[in-house]
Image (cartoon, rainbow, N blue to C red):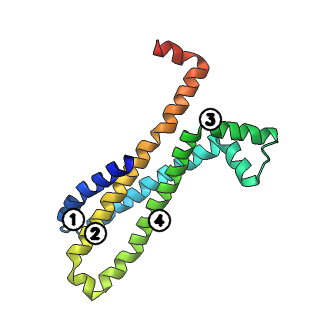
Amino acid sequence: MKKWISIIILLALSAPAFVFGRNICFAEQWHAFDGLRQTASIIFGVFGVWLAIVYRDDIVSRLVGVSAKNDDGQKAIKKAEEDIDAFECVFNGVIYSSVIIAVILVIGLIAPVIRQVGWFCKYAWIIRACSFYFLMVLTVAQLYVILMSLSPMVSAREKVLKALGIINIIRK
């Protein structure tokens, strides 16, 4: 269901992106690409720190190969099983942010080359429209990652409140 909603949103936004994007020069679009790259870098860093702090034992046990028979290994596996949704959310956020950064870096390398090729200059409006469409897709993806970052925060908040015995008072 989520997949279909994503496809519908991208298709609904594609027509306006092509129509309006063809009139926006790449120099103006690049400011948005750069801001998006910076945002993705910040999200990447935040999620990386989150993984390193909250899921340290699980990551170390997976990377070092700590045995499940070992107490540390058992604790890490138990914690990962309890927090699998939050862990996947944080880990996927790192992956998505990495992909967004990589795509923007590639676009930054390809754009100057495209400007030098005569055939592309003749159809610059198509290139600008496609560029703006990629900007729109990457922005929607980054918004998704930002919203996805709320899930582990809510989960952590509930655990802290539950541990303090506050959550039962609030829900009553």
Amino acid type of the residue tagged 4 in the rendering: Ala
Residue 90 lies, in percent from the top left, at 53, 46
Quote the CA–CA distance across marks 2 and 1. 7 Å
- Horizontal relation, residue 91 to residue 1: left or right: right
Mark nearer the N terminus (3 vs 2) = 3
Residue matched to label 3: 82
Amino acid type of the residue tagged 1 in the rendering: Phe
Residue matched to label 2: 130
Q: Can you say whether 114 is above or below 163 in the image?
A: below
Amino acid type of the residue tagged 3 in the rendering: Glu
Mark nearer the N terminus (2 vs 1) = 1
Judged by depth in the image, the label closer to the viewer, 4 or 3, is: 3
Do the residues bearing badges 4 and 3 touch, measured as CB atoms within 8 Å? no
Quote the CA–CA distance across marks 1 and 4. 23 Å
Is disc 1 placed on a helix, strand or loop? Answer: helix
Do the residues bearing badges 2 and 1 touch, measured as CB atoms within 8 Å? yes
| Tag count | 4
Mark nearer the N terminus (2 vs 4) = 4
- Horizontal relation, residue 126 to residue 112: left or right: left
Q: Can you say whether 109 is above or below 159 in the image?
A: below
Quote the CA–CA distance across marks 3 and 2. 43 Å
Residue 72 occupies which quadrant of the picture? top right
Residue matched to label 4: 102
Is disc 4 placed on a helix, strand or loop? Answer: helix
Question: At x 58% / y 40%, what residue is drawn?
Answer: 84
Residue 140 lies, in percent from the top left, at 34, 53
